[in-house]
Amino acid sequence: MAPGNYRERSLKIHGFVCARCARSFDHTNRHLLTVHHKDGNHDNNPPDGSNWENLCAYCHDDEHSRTLLGRYFSEQK
């Protein structure tokens, strides 16, 4: 799958709903729905969408903030 084409595919597979907060989206606000790569690898785009989850912009920011904080605290010893 060509890079960048996974967003529309993910929306078709997983729908216009945030996987975390369950907020629904439609054509008027779909720009607030993003695709998160579960394994963090943006090149891992299987056709079945198993590495993706649709997250709203707020939940996506939260997910990446948690990852950064986790790394920070695990390095503090």
Image (cartoon, helix red, strand yellow):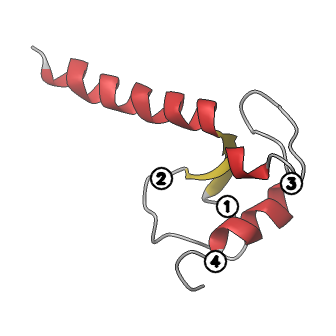
Label 1 environment density (alpha carbons within 10 Å; few <14, some 14–19, many ≥20): some
Q: CA distance from mark 3 to mark 2?
A: 20 Å
Looking at marks 4 and 2 on the same chain, the residue that comes earlier in the sequence is marked by 4
In which quadrant will I find the N terminus? Answer: bottom right
* Disc 4 from disc 2: Cα separation: 18 Å
Q: Which residue is mark 4?
A: 5
Of badges 1 and 3, the one in the foreground is 3
Instruction: Name which residue lies at 88% across and 38% down.
Output: 24
Which is more N-terminal, label 4 or label 3? 4
Position of 23 with respect to 70 (left or right) is right
Q: Which of labels 1 and 4 is toward the front?
A: 4
The kind of secondary structure element at disc 1 is loop
For the residues bearing labels 3 and 2, Cβ distance under 8 angstroms: no
CA gap between label 1 and label 4 equals: 15 Å
Would you name the residue on which mark 2 appears? 39
Residue at numbered disc 1: 50
Amino acid under disc 4: Asn
Q: Secondary structure at mark 4?
A: loop
Q: Are marks 3 and 4 in contact (CB under 8 Å)?
A: no
- Residue 20 position within the rendered picture, expressed as x and y whole percent measured from the top left: 71, 31
Spot occupied by residue 35 in the image (x, y as percentages of width and height)? 63, 54
Is 43 situated above or below 69? below
Distance from disc 1 to disc 3, alpha carbons, whole Å, reads 14 Å
Residue situated in front as seen by the camera: 23 or 73: 23
Select label 3 or label 2 by which is in front: 3
Which quarter of the figure has residue 59?
top right
- The residue that disc 3 covers is 15
Residue at disc 2, secondary structure: loop
Q: Going by the picture, which residue comes out furthest to the left?
A: 77
Q: Earlier in the sequence, mark 3 or mark 2?
A: 3
